Image (cartoon, rainbow, N blue to C red):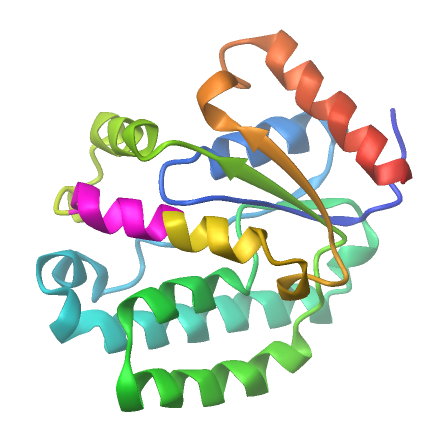
C-alpha cells in the first residue's frame, strides 16, 4: 500500500465531471476516509435552477454555511492527519458565487467567505477533472436527479469556463499540488486500467 505524503486530497470539476465516483474509487483503493458533499439538503436548489436570479443568493449562502460547517467538523476531528479524499474543496463555493451573484449580494458573500476561509485548511493535492460541456450534460441527464433537470447547456458551459479560469491561475491554490485529468478520455469506474493510470499519476505527483 502506497503511503501518501499528501493527506488531504480533493477531486474537483464542474457538475457531472465524476468527482464523487472517483473519490469512492480512490478511497476504496487506498482504504482512506471519504468526505462527500451533501447537495440534496439545500432546500433552495430546485427553485434555483428554475429562477437563478431570484434564488441565487439564498442557495449560495446555504451552501457556504453547510460546507463551512462540514469542513470545521472535519478539522476539529483532526481527520486531515489521515489520508482523506473529498469530492469538493471549500473554495469551489466562490466559483459558483461569482457566476451567480453580483452587486451587493456578491459583496456580502465575499465578506462572509473571506472570514470563513481563514479556518479551512488548504488541500495538499487537487485533482481537477476537466470535461467537455457535452459530457457534463450527458452525465447529468443520465443520472436524472430531479433538482438538476432544469440545468441548461448555457449555464453549464459558463460554469465549465469558470472552473477553467480558476485552475489556470495558480494563485487561487498556492499551497496545493494540482493534477489534471481529461474526464472525456477516462472511465475510472468501468475500466480498471484507467483507474490504475490515475493512481500512478497521483503517486508521481505526490512525490514531487
Picture quadrant of residue 204: top right
Instruction: Tell me residue 126's x, y (percent).
Output: 66, 47
Q: Is residue 154 magenta?
A: yes
**Above or below, 51 relative to 182:** below
The reply to whether residue 37 is visible in this rendering is: no
Q: Residue furthest left?
A: 50
User: Foreground residue, 133 or 143?
Assistant: 133
Queried whether the magenta region covers residue 200, the answer comes back as no
Residue 128 position, x and y percent, is 57, 41
**Vertical placement of 19 versus 72: above or below?**
above
Residue 52 on image: x %, y %? 16, 65
The reply to whether residue 45 is visible in this rendering is: yes
Q: How many marks?
A: 0
- Seen at 23% across and 51% down, the residue is 155
Q: In the picture, residue 196 is in which quadrant? A: top right
Question: 24 left or right of 42?
Answer: right
Task: Report the residue at 46% width, 51% height from top.
Answer: 163
State the residue at coordinates (26%, 26%).
138
Left or right of 82? Residue 123 is left
Q: Quadrant of the C terminus?
A: top right
Q: Quadrant of the N terminus?
A: top right
Report the magenta stretch's main SS. helix
**Where is 37 relative to 65, above or below?**
above
Q: Which residues are magenta?
A: 151-160
43 horizontally vs 60: left or right: left
Amino acid at each position: 500500500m502506497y503511503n501518501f505524503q499528501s493527506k488531504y486530497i480533493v477531486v474537483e470539476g464542474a457538475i457531472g465531471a465524476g468527482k464523487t465516483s472517483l473519490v469512492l474509487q480512490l478511497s476504496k483503493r487506498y482504504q482512506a476516509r471519504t468526505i462527500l458533499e451533501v447537495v440534496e439538503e439545500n432546500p433552495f436548489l430546485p427553485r434555483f435552477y428554475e429562477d437563478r436570479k431570484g434564488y441565487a443568493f439564498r442557495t449560495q449562502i446555504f451552501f457556504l454555511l453547510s460546507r463551512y460547517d462540514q469542513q470545521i467538523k472535519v478539522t476539529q476531528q483532526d481527520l486531515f492527519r489521515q489520508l482523506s479524499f473529498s469530492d469538493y474543496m471549500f473554495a469551489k463555493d466562490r466559483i459558483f458565487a461569482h457566476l451567480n451573484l453580483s452587486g451587493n449580494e456578491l459583496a456580502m458573500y465575499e465578506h462572509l467567505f473571506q472570514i470563513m476561509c481563514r479556518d479551512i485548511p488548504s488541500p495538499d493535492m487537487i485533482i481537477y477533472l476537466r470535461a467537455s460541456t457535452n459530457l457534463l450534460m450527458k452525465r447529468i441527464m443520465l443520472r436524472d436527479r430531479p433538482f438538476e433537470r432544469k440545468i441548461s447547456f448555457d449555464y453549464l458551459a459558463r460554469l465549465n469556463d469558470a472552473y477553467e479560469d480558476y485552475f489556470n491561475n495558480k494563485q487561487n491554490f498556492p499551497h496545493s499540488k494540482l493534477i489534471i485529468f481529461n474526464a472525456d478520455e477516462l472511465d475510472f469506474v468501468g475500466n480498471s486500467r484507467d483507474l490504475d493510470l490515475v493512481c500512478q499519476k497521483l503517486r508521481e505527483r505526490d512525490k514531487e
